[in-house]
Image (tube, grey):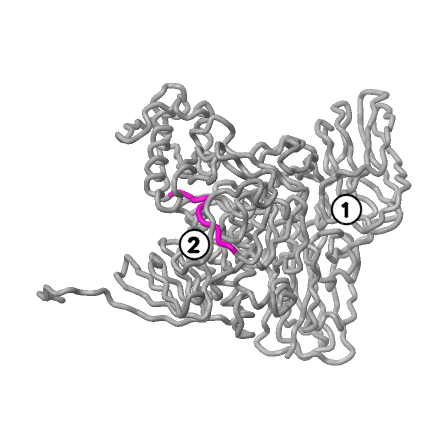
Amino acid sequence: MIRSENTGKRSFPGIRFEADLVITGGGLSGVCCAITAARQGLQVILVQDRPVLGGNSSSEVRLWVLGATSHMGNNNRWAREGGVLDEILVENMYRNPEGNPVIYDSILLDKVVTEKNITLLLNTVVYEVMKKDESTISAVRAFCSQNQTEYELTAPLFCDASGDGVTGFLSGAAFRMGAESKEEFGEGFAPSEEYGELLGHSLYFYTKDTGRPVSFVPPAFALDDITQIPRFRSFNTKEYGCRLWWIEYGGRLDTVHDTETIKWELWKIVYGVWNHIKNSGQFPEAENLTLEWVGMIPGKRESRRFEGDYILKQQDIIEQRVHEDAVAFGGWSVDLHPADGVYATGPGCNQWHSKGTYQIPYRCLYSRNINNLLLAGRIISASHVAFGSSRVMGTAAYAAQAVGMAAVLCKKYRCRPAELFTQKKITELQRRLMQAGQYIPHHLMHDEQDLVQLACIHATSELELQEIPEDGGLLPLDLPVGQMVPVKAGKMPDLVLHAYTDMPGAILEVEVRISSNTGNYTPDRTLARFELLLQKGRNCLPVQPGITIAESQYVFVILHRNPAINIPRSAARITGILSVFNTINPAVSNFGKQEPPAHIGMDSFEFWCPQRRPAGQNIAIKFKPALSGFGAANLRNGIARPTLQPNAWVADPKDHSPAVELRWEQPQTIKKIVLTFDTDYDHPMESVLMGHPERVMPFCVRRYKILDDKNEVVYECSNNYQTINTILPERAISTRSLRILMEHPSAHTPAALFEVRCYGE
């Protein structure tokens, strides 16, 4: 028993921690930054002011994680982010395909607490920054409300991933808040004062069918008149959670210091909406529904943006500018919202897409005036317009991984974050990121430590794609469809298409297109057109494009809409082979074609997007000569996802024991093996609310084993579902060869492998 009669002043107990890196903010960006740095040996303290990790993606807010894939609603193919973020999303798919936000919480916690180099402080708020001098942070002070303990956290490096930038603000780091004028950066999409300078907060709710009638008595603060919301007719009983992202408010207020005021207004709206649904009599289908969950804290979109040595701008996104210090990429639309949010009379957002992904330079990821402060999450150095794209969680967390790796190099070279750029350490930063699974557009990994670069590579077979077989049923040509075909530089192969019709004389219009910007997947340049006259029944249609492809790239074979025609589909799912449709996705402002006003600096183009499985089958086509871009040499070409070509070794489907062998002239001592499999970088893997048809991506090799030159098994896996498999044998392997034996994922999907790397001493 403890008794105290001391009436004097008391203080809370204090604990002092030292580390290599202190990260403020345990949202998805802070988590990915912390794990990246910890796995490279840094001692990391992760400070989170909430009881769970994940920020806006957590069960407290319940917004799905998205980035460049944009719900598969744009032209960014194979654009899901890599590295730790990919690992988390793939793990969530396996454990939680239903999108349960509580299970998602547990996955993030699991990932962090299993890293021995991370000290996690939950429910802990940073409230003071201590400085060595005007431009250097020495420590932060924080308080945990649950154990009434104060912490002093000391490190040579700090990262602010807190969303509102608490460490940056308290340290005196230069920041901006609100929209820049059109004149400052020449951004045509910069909003007027009437539109507003800030994006507001959102707060969601979930419903549940109880199986019996449920009444609802609204709280006194609920919105009385739902017609105050201009879009009130859009509310229904089927949409809940972050599908109601447009329940937004606060863009006219201070989105930091007025957050509690904003939250109360959002509660007022949510309970008013539910009162309308339950008690207006307009929704009889809601009789058995109850309000299962309402967010307790709002999801924030925008507050402070801190200044680095470079400010990302609209032109970087739309023109896809190339930066020598690129460390990440984005691809979400430039997505700005009216400041009045749900009370605005116009649309809830104004989204304009780029034709492809864009690079994010390292100079956006550290403070220009606080020399040991790194920036992660939505607070990175960007204009208000560019922030409209870079703010989304997938993009923000991806850039945060670069921050974690930058901290590793800062320790290695005993330098400040800005000096990685000025002292030309960016190439090493890029290489280390790519080794960890981070794809950087227009960059190849040159890994001199990789023993595979010295090996002879042989495969039991290599796919020569003579045809995408006609075994998946017929598809009415109600929408224009395009089959993406990886073609190497030179003469394009001849094609044979198939079509069925009951209408003699029907015309099948065919186009061959490429992207005007090699590396994009916007088919905006037509190379050839054909009009093919059909007879009744099945038609076998030879097409001789007769064109030369200047650079290796994806070519689109487009079949235009004609409802009188059916085209055969294929059950085959092959790495690097994809069909796309000229269709709409209103969720991301895709209405088939983007046609912006001329003065806002955005491009006009068509959207050609995949369909989600089980739809989205490939179109049956024959090729002469066969497509041959699936060789074993791809395993060390420095790219581990489809780009201009599949960049994968793909086995022949008829090969019953597909395998790859690495052979060296002299014995090698191998301590680490890295394999990169295909977990479908085109699938966005929304983390909550939206369910998914599979736990494991259909392209992913599930079972494999590795044998040495004595034919002894050195490693075996029977249930793989992850992208990157890092194998650390208990004892170093001494061998002249490694043979990787794989099983085909299914009868319709041949085994594929993007990359194999081996490391020794």
Q: Position of residue 313 (x, y in %)?
A: 59, 47
Q: Which mark is residue 333?
A: none
In the rendered structure, which amino acid carries the disc numbered 1?
Tyr
User: Is the magenta region chiefly helix, strand or loop?
Assistant: loop
Check the image and name the residue furthest to the front.
183
Q: Position of residue 609 (x, y in %)?
A: 67, 38
Quadrant including the C terminus: bottom right
Q: Position of residue 446 (x, y in %)?
A: 70, 67
Q: Which residue is mark 2?
A: 165
Whether 305 is among the magenta residues is yes
Q: Is residue 720 visible?
A: no
Q: From which residue to which does the magenta span run?
A: 298-307
Residue positioned 43% across, 39% down in the render:
200
Whether 709 is among the magenta residues is no
Front residue of 19/420: it is 420
The relative height of residue 759 versus residue 362 in the rendered view (above or below) is below
Would you call the spot at circle 2 few (<14 residues within 10 Å), some (14-19), or many (20 or more)? many
Front residue of 84/678: it is 84
Front label number (2 vs 1): 2
Mark 2 touching mark 1, by CB under 8 A?
Answer: no
Left or right, 91 with respect to 46, comes to: right
The relative height of residue 333 versus residue 370 in the rendered view (above or below) is above
Q: Which residue is mark 1?
A: 554
In the rendered structure, which amino acid carries the disc numbered 2?
Gly
Question: In which quadrant of the rendered view does residue 605 lie?
Answer: top right
* SS category of the residue bearing label 1: strand
Question: In which quadrant of the rendered view does residue 586 lie?
Answer: top right
Left or right, 74 with respect to 291, comes to: right
Quadrant including the N terminus: bottom left
The relative height of residue 596 versus residue 70 in the rendered view (above or below) is above
